[in-house]
Image: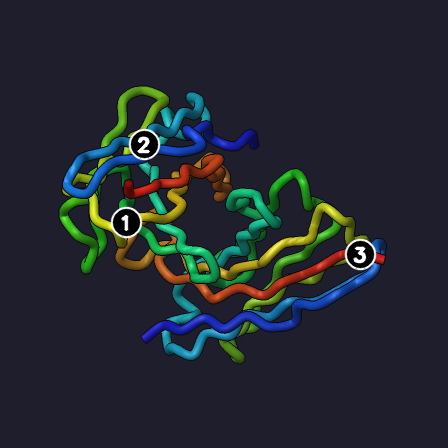
Amino acid sequence: QSALTQPASVSGSPGQSITISCTGTNSDVGGYNLVSWYQHHPGKAPRVMIYEGSKRPSGVSNRFSGSKSGNTASLTISGLQAEDEAEYYCCSYAGSSTYVFGTGTKVTVL
Amino acid sequence: EVQLVESGGGLVQPGGSLRLSCEDSGSTFIRYGMNWVRQAPGKGLEWVSGISSSGGSTYYADSVKGRLTISRDNSKNTLYLQMNSLRAEDTAVYYCARVGGLVAGAFEYWGQGTLVTVSS
């Protein structure tokens, strides 16, 4: 149950696109199509932005997109906005009704 | 509307016990599996435990197995986490989260969290 690996920080200017990677193993990211991504502002509850690797819940901007290749999942935020500044976590189903989160990525809008 | 509200956090000495609760004010609690996720100070999110909709199956992270026990009372729309033999490393904000529904395999609804501090 080792945490998935994410870059500690990613930054971009308003309007730019950024991509956050999430690397796991064949036992989690690579083994299931159940990667989700969460936006977390300090002091608030996390919010799901992507589920099943690439699907957006109702109400989430289409500026957020997800993909997966092998043991690595990615979250792309296009048209970066000030409100996107937050911590982002990936999460993968890991079998037997267990889950594993990523190490988290701080997104800074310059 | 699903609204999850945690309670029961506080300061406890190492080796002590605490019971967290998470009440769902909606009407669909009985249909879904529930989980506890925590965030230690300055650290990332960590999945802690999960329970099936009926309560018949429970699941734990290796780091808490044998010390934390998840349960639920569907008649009260309430999820619990009994925390025993607490350690300093259990200090964290504990969130309850509902899995599934419109977002398969993901945590769709979260509470605001309750802080547990383990310290002498």
Quarter holding the C terminus of chain A is top left
On screen, residue A52 versus residue A44, left or right, reads: left
Indicate which disc, 2 or 1, sits on the residue closer to the N terminus.
2
Q: Position of residue B44 (x, y in %)?
A: 52, 43
Q: Which residue is mark 1?
A: A84
Q: Quadrant of residue A46?
A: bottom left
The amino acid at mark 2 is Ile
Residue at 16%, 39% (x, y): give it.
A78
Q: Position of residue A101 (x, y in %)?
A: 47, 39
Q: Secondary structure at mark 3?
A: loop
The amino acid at mark 3 is Ser
Dot label at residue B119: 3
Q: Secondary structure at mark 1?
A: helix
Front residue (pair B28, A35): A35
The chain holding disc 1 is: A
Cα gap from disc 3 to disc 1, whole angstroms = 35 Å
Q: Can the viewer see residue A54 in this picture?
A: yes
Q: Position of residue B86 (x, y in %)?
A: 78, 53
